[in-house]
Image: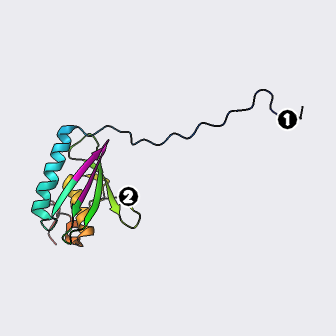
Amino acid sequence: MIAGAPVGPPLAASPPEPRPSIGGVPIPERARTDLTARLEAHRRRRWPQLKDARVRFRAPYAYVEATLPDGYDQPLFRLRWTNNRDRWAFAIWLASKGGYEVSLLPSGALVGTVEEAMDCACGLYLNDISAWELPRQRSAPPH
């Protein structure tokens, strides 16, 4: 026997690493319907140059893409359900990375409304920085 050698049967190979799962609470049907309706209403009102906008759902995520004026189908952003129909976690699609990146909204928050998320992404992909302007605070004194 070799000094320091393990005693007993040889160790079995380690089990494969589990695949990461998306996890999280799926978006309730009522919230899905509300999200889809709000996105379409906001698209028509603020972003009529988009030919359409589509949402697909997977577990706690809603993936939003749109057809740009040139006919290109563009992923825009991803929202994560936070158990509140007015507060969604935001991640923007980055073509340079080919994926989503958790991002701040123009307000500086990581969560916000569906409309804020759409404005942030469309401001980037439609080159309209006015979408990132915040409403003036009503309590701010005049200059």
Q: Tag 2 or tag 1, which sits nearer the N-term?
A: 1
Residue at the image point whose x is 32% and y is 53% from the top: 110
SS for callout 1: loop
Quadrant occupied by the N terminus: top right
User: Where are the magenta residues, as a range?
Assistant: 55-65
Q: Based on the displayed image, in which of its 4 quarters is residue 120 positioned? A: bottom left
Judging depth in this view, the residue of 30 and 10 nearest the camera is 10
x, y (%) of residue 113? Answer: 21, 52
Q: Based on the displayed image, in which of its 4 quarters is residue 44 positioned? A: bottom left
Q: Tell me how many marks there are.
A: 2
Residue bearing the label numbered 1: 4
Picture colour scheme: rainbow
SS for callout 2: strand
Considering only vertical position in the picture, is 126 above or below 114? below
| Pointer 1 local density, CA inside 10 Å: few below 14, some 14–19, many at least 20 | few
Indicate the amino acid at tag 2. Answer: Glu
Considering only vertical position in the picture, is 68 above or below 114? below
Q: For residue 101, which numbered disc appears in the image? A: 2
x, y (%) of residue 48? Answer: 12, 65
Quadrant occupied by the C terminus: bottom left
Residue at the image point whose x is 27% and y is 46% from the top: 57
Q: For residue 105, which numbered disc appears in the image? A: none
Residue at the image point whose x is 51% and y is 39% from the top: 18
Considering only vertical position in the picture, is 1 above or below 114? above
Which secondary structure type mostly characterizes the magenta part of the structure? strand
Q: Tell me, yes or no, whether the highlighted magenta stretch contains residue 26.
A: no
| Pointer 2 local density, CA inside 10 Å: few below 14, some 14–19, many at least 20 | some
Indicate the amino acid at tag 1. Answer: Gly
Q: Is residue 28 left or right of residue 22?
A: left
